[in-house]
Amino acid sequence: MIYTVTFNPSLDYIVRLDSFTAGEINRVNYEQVLGGGKGINVSIVLGNLGHESTALGFTAGFTGEEIKRQLDGFGVKHDFVQLPEGFTRINVKVKADKETEINGQGPDISEAKREELFEKLDKLSKGDTLVLAGSIPKTLPDDIYEKIMARLEGRGIRIIVDAEKKLLLNVLKYHPFLIKPNNHELGDMFGVKLTTDEEIITYAKKLQEKGAQNVLISMAGDGAILLTADGKHYKSPAPKGKLINSVGAGDSMVAGFITGYIESQGDFETAFHMGVATGSASAFSENLATRPEVEALLKTII
């Protein structure tokens, strides 16, 4: 079974305008309300690709109920910890001549509610896949990723981590199955600017030396690179298409990788190409990738 954890989910209010001027009334020409958060996106795309998962995390209030309602509509299972006060955050994403985001802060999460999540994770067993993705709210400890991985260590669970800088670096000692930084995040971890494939591979290997098994580096329009635990590396260009919405593209890549890995019974090259095609399919669409969109792009890169 596949499980995803979203510590700080959101209800995203997405608007498009011809132009945006601060301090004035701006009228939108497109609007949409979508349940979001990296793990939730992974679960939705997995469902679109034909694979069942269970979305875990924390929800609260009317916005949390709307996220669950939307997941029900997608046919995605969920088992969130319900918080008694506050509401799941609302993020406003303004797409005009420039993209602007205003992200909410999210509800308080008590130690008792945190333990509820741990108890759900304790039910995972050998062969399961767990995706830990995204930021953490200020009311959770900075080492929440580490606590989960330490708790599950040695149980044969494939753990995938998609998080920024310290959240990611601090869990490498627990040997995650896959991590997915982008090229800019990879450079930030080591205080360098990476400009060539050779530099990216060099620093990705440093993450392997710190404990990561497989490292998937997304590079937006420049494609992606995968380094595997057996010392191989793969490079793929990005499929050609018009960028419409970059939100969720990285999460879609993770879902595509998992799908390819499962369907090929562990072939990393197949998983890699499926990941690249799925990430691009979401980037080229108003919504998250669907199976037909992914398969059409897959034919252009293999």
Image (tube, rainbow, N blue to C red):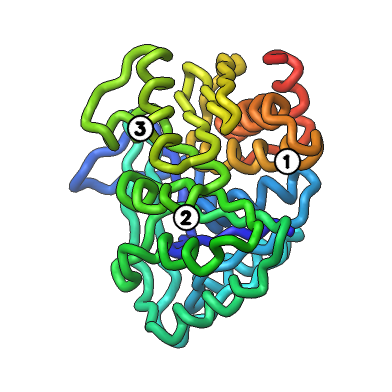
Question: Residue 280 sits in which quadrant?
Answer: top right
Q: Determine crowd level at label 2: few under 14, some 14-19, many 20+ residues with C-alpha closer than 10 A.
A: many
In the rendered image, residue 116, in percent from the top left (x then y), is placed at 53, 82
User: What residue do we see at 49% from left, 61% from top?
Assistant: 149
Residue found at the far left of this picture: 23
Residue at 48% x, 81% y: name it.
115
Residue position for label 1: 259
Give the mark nearest the N terminus, 1 or 3: 3
Is label 1 in a helix, a strand or a loop? helix
* Mark seen at residue 12: 2
Q: Residue at x 60, y 28 (%)?
A: 230
Q: Position of residue 102 (x, y in %)?
A: 31, 52
Q: Secondary structure at mark 2?
A: strand
Q: Position of residue 91 (x, y in %)?
A: 40, 56
Which residue is drawn at the image coordinates 63% and 52% (left, top)? 158
The amino acid marked with disc number 2 is: Asp
User: Tag on residue 223?
Assistant: none
Residue under label 3: 186
